[in-house]
Image (cartoon, coloured by chain):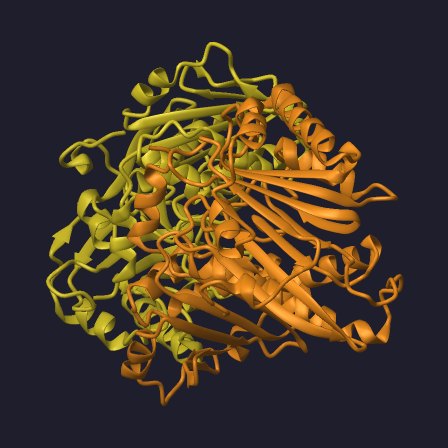
Chain colours: A orange, B yellow
């Protein structure tokens, strides 16, 4: 992961402009990010599949599905999710986007917004509007500060940068994300924004984003809880001098796709590392399952098991809990064929503990910060990898009293 | 819940004989329960649906499905689950049941066993066999001590007793159970044994057990983790003088069915109250859902949400997390129709916070030990109730180092 002190100096996306404010939703902290883009910037997005999505998510989904979609302005506030706020919440989004479309001299459909924080509290649009109108930004064009301004229970700002070639053109990519709790699969987890200057239409961007989302943001879990506000946008200012890309299968796009995938996985892993109270990142690789969905279900059954996660927190070689979690996935398995490995250590064979298993090896291995568990199901050829973190007392402390 | 000091004195099931041993699987604690029954005692059972069931569960399932099933002997050990022990585990079960069938002078198919404790450790059958052969029982015919001997992380023994009329005959029912962690739905949760003297065949017993299981043991969750060893047996010594009941629809059976249901719910709630680290029991009632499965999924989505459970542990009126958990169930809902109530306090209406909502009422209500949350979905007529507990730091402490 890239952690330069001021990454914006190493990379620049023409036309991209960050402004970071303190709007007083949170006390004495930046809590508002305003990003503006040149005309005809391309936009794609994936969102929470929650049946109680926030007002901003509902608005974004509508706009990202327009035939002639584009973006001029993105506004993100932290400290209040504007979720489950009924008709009032919708009006709030409309007021903010109307104000910004006037300010940027663009269509309301070109203004996107996100909100993250407590669910069920009314968000006062005046706070945001008057802040942008009257206050000076606290920071300008800092990726780090942009990432900081959207944090809630996060303990560090999450961002990643990359350069990649498209034909002879150098393309730049910047991603920021937030997320620490209420993180679970089946969506564009939490808030993530990825910016590039590659000249590419929104449709192609959308396909790239949707494809890569499944193996990155949709393959992490902190606590199995899915947020109402999850949003991931992939945006291009289109300022690179390449001829506009209209074909997803353009063979020169492979580098860019790989680059987006890496950025997304990097951000996704940062979210897991910063999982509330987490001390360890756990990679769970399921191999040779009967189908992809079977591999995925088994991996998530392990990754979401509180008993597995607490054992790893306690550095306790209680691998039987992995067996339990495989069993409760109800996927097709033959317990005699399962091979479980912690790092390089084989733990089970023939439906029981491996004859050469030494507990002290596992105990030693579990002291690492990065734990890799691989499960060979021995029933087919399909695999899936999921990332999660351990479950510590700190998670409870954070969440038993999040709002105060 | 009935908590007499020595309940066996208040109730007696003819032909039922408990012996409680210390077999040295656990140090200085009773860890072995041997129950014997008269000839032709009726048996029914429900078991974990885990795909990694323990050797004892596999053996029980086979025997309970026999056409001419009956039980003479039940043996339960705690401290070792004999799960994921491969062919060795199967041999262990066979050795124990062979020994007991000789001892009780019965068929091996009439001997049932359960094991609970750590997964993946070999269970030495000699320990159990030589204990029963050579040691004196520590207690005899005490319900409380029987319940204690099967405990693992439980903090109190779980049992319930009842008397009920069938026609003019007084029928007795005794239930014992264990369970505290690795508790989740879709099975006969953990270990539970219910004994009666009603003269009834195994087929009818099985139907009663299967029917009542869904709304009792299958409607509790502590941590969403499903054990490899879950077993619930309903056994009759058939010593009541009533004519053998062969018809599930016998109209005089209603009292008995209700009584079994009450005993099972009572035991299920005791398991939740004793959920690892739990300080509160939470009842989640979902009403007016589109289907029963929808009501059930929404209820479990809430009951298994770590964010909901930690908020309740912290007595924090963060009801937005209920909204999140409803949303992540992906069930058919209209967020504007959802009404959430904590006890008598209405919290939401019209897709937002209820206008007369007062946070101090909720904060006060959350100080209770028993919390009732009801959710009116407003989409149909179906309902389901689920029981769970809060999630505290103590859960992590217990499970980060269970084995040591």
Q: Is residue A174 visible?
A: yes
Vertical order, B155 against A376 (above or below): above
Residue A115 in the image: x percent, y percent? 56, 37
Instruction: Name the residue rendered at 75%, 62% in the picture.
Output: A208
Residue B238 in the image: x percent, y percent? 38, 42
Instruction: Please identify the quarter of the rendering in which residue A30 is found.
Output: top left
Q: Quadrant of the C terminus of chain A?
A: top left
In the rendered picture of this protein, how many numbered marks are placed on residues? 0
User: Which residue extends farthest bottom?
Assistant: A356
Instruction: Please identify the quarter of the rendering in which residue A99 is found.
Output: top right
Residue B42 in the image: x percent, y percent? 43, 48
Vertical order, B181 against B338 (above or below): below
Vertical order, A43 against A174 (above or below): above
Residue B319 in the image: x percent, y percent? 45, 28
Instruction: Name the residue rendered at 67%, 70% in the picture.
Output: A259
Left or right: B379, with B368 as reference point: right
Q: Is residue B62 visible?
A: no
Instruction: Name the residue rendered at 62%, 24% in the picture.
Output: A92
Of residues B261 and B309, the one drawn nearer to the viewer in this rendering: B309
Of residues A404 and A200, the one drawn nearer to the viewer in this rendering: A200
User: Which residue extends farthest top?
Assistant: B356
């Amino acid at each position: 992961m890239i952690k330069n002190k001021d990454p914006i100096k190493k990379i620049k996306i023409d036309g991209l402009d960050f402004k970071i404010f303190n709007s007083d939703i949170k006390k004495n902290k930046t809590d508002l990010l305003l990003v503006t883009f040149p005309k005809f910037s391309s936009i794609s997005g994936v969102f929470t599949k929650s049946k109680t999505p926030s007002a901003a998510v509902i608005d974004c989904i509508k706009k990202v599905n327009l035939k002639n979609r584009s973006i001029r302005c993105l506004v993100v506030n932290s400290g209040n999710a504007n979720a489950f706020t009924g008709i009032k919440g919708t009006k709030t989004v409309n007021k903010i986007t109307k104000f910004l479309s006037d300010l940027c001299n663009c269509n309301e459909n070109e203004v996107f917004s996100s909100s993250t924080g407590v669910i069920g509290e009314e968000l006062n649009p005046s706070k945001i509007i008057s802040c942008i109108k009257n206050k000076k930004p606290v920071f300008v064009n800092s990726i780090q500060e942009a990432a900081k301004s959207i944090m809630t229970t996060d303990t560090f700002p999450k961002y990643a940068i990359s350069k990649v070639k498209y034909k002879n053109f150098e393309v730049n990519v910047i991603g920021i994300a937030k997320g620490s709790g209420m993180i679970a699969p089946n969506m564009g987890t939490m808030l993530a924004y990825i910016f590039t200057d590659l000249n590419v239409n929104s449709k192609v961007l959308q396909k790239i984003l949707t494809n890569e989302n499944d193996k990155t943001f949709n393959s992490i879990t902190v606590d199995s809880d899915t947020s109402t506000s999850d949003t991931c946008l992939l945006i291009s200012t289109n300022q690179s001098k390449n001829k506009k890309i209209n074909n997803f299968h353009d063979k020169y796009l492979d580098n860019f796709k790989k680059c987006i995938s890496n950025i997304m996985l990097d951000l996704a892993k940062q979210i897991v590392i910063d999982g509330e109270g987490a001390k360890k990142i756990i990679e769970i690789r399921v191999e040779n399952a009967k189908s992809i969905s079977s591999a995925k279900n088994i991996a998530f059954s392990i990754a979401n098991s509180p008993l597995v996660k607490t054992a790893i927190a306690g550095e306790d070689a209680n691998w039987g809990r992995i067996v339990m979690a495989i069993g409760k996935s109800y996927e097709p398995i033959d317990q005699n064929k399962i091979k479980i490995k912690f790092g390089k250590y084989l733990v089970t064979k023939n439906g029981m503990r491996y004859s050469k298993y030494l507990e002290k090896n596992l105990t030693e291995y579990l002291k690492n910060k990065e734990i890799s568990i691989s499960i060979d199901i021995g029933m087919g050829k399909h695999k899936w990898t999921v990332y999660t973190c351990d479950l510590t007392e700190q998670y409870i402390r954070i969440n038993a009293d999040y709002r105060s």
